[in-house]
Image (spheres, rainbow, N blue to C red):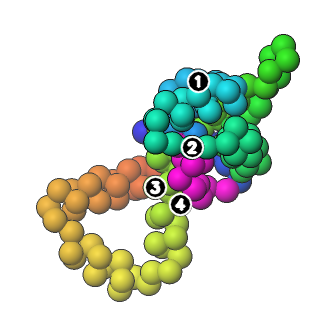
């Protein structure tokens, strides 16, 4: 599993169009507004203004998900976070939210309700945390 990316996006929450455009950029590695707009409009039932794509790309850049480079006279956007890193960030964010509102009894009740496979995953996580804690103590 990849580590948390550094730097991390400033804002993790993404809307549906932001997510769709980010997924297109993951497929293409980098793209212009036209590339993305054309890709979205391959669906004949879809309407989306070119300027809307530009707005979303700027918003994703401000949130820290994308970088914009100027190549010749065109601007190209590229993701700063891989799909794997995005999954790690989302999982980390959900876990932090869960732990911030939960007390030990709630966490224990949650753990008691897990099936065997989930309990085994939790045990593997606990072992990993123990190893990380020991490594920190030794350094």
The secondary element bearing badge 1 is classed as loop
Label 2, label 4: how far apart the Cα atoms are = 33 Å
**Numbered range of the magenta stretch:** 11-20
**Disc 4 secondary structure class:** helix
* Residue 50 quadrant: top right
The CA span between labels 1 and 2 is 24 Å
Q: Which residue is mark 4?
A: 93
Callout 4: few (<14), some (14-19), or many (20+) C-alpha neighbours within 10 Å? some
Horizontal side of 98 relative to 126 (left or right) equals right
Callouts 2 and 4 close, C-beta under 8 Å: no
Q: Position of residue 130 (x, y in %)?
A: 40, 56
Q: How many neighbours does mark 3 have within 10 angstroms: few (below 14), some (14-19), or many (20 or more)?
A: few
**Which residue bears the numbered disc 3?**
91
Residue at the image point whose x is 67% and y is 56% from the top: 11
Residue depth check, mark 1 versus mark 2: number of the one nearer the observer? 2
Residues under labels 2 and 3: Cα distance?
33 Å
Viewer-side residue, 122 vs 130: 122
The residue wearing badge 2 is 47
Residue 46 at what x, y percent from top left?
Answer: 51, 42
| Towards the viewer: 137 or 125 | 125
Contact? badges 2 and 3 (CB < 8 Å)? no
Lateral position of residue 123 relative to residue 18, left or right: left
The quarter of the picture where the N terminus appears is top left
Q: Residue at x 54, y 29 (%)?
A: 39
Q: Residue 30 is drawn in which quadrant? A: top right
Write down the residue under mark 1. Answer: 29
Earlier residue among tags 2 and 3: 2
Instruction: State yes or no: discs 3 and 4 in contact (Cβ < 8 Å).
Output: yes
- Mark closer to the chain start, 1 or 4: 1
Whole-Å distance between the Cαs marked 3 and 4? 5 Å
């Amino acid at each position: 599993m990849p580590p948390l990316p550094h730097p991390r996006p400033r804002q993790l929450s993404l809307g549906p169009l932001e997510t769709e455009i980010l997924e297109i950029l993951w497929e293409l590695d980098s793209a212009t507004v036209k590339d993305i707009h054309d890709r979205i409009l391959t669906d004949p039932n879809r309407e989306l203004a070119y300027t809307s794509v530009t707005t979303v790309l700027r918003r994703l850049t401000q949130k820290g998900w994308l970088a914009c480079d100027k190549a010749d006279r065109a601007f190209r956007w590229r993701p700063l976070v891989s799909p794997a890193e995005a999954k790690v960030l989302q999982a980390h964010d959900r876990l932090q939210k869960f732990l911030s509102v939960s007390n030990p009894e709630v966490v224990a009740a949650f753990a008691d309700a897990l099936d065997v496979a989930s309990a085994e995953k939790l045990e593997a996580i606990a072992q990993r945390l123990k190893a990380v804690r020991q490594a920190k103590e030794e350094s």
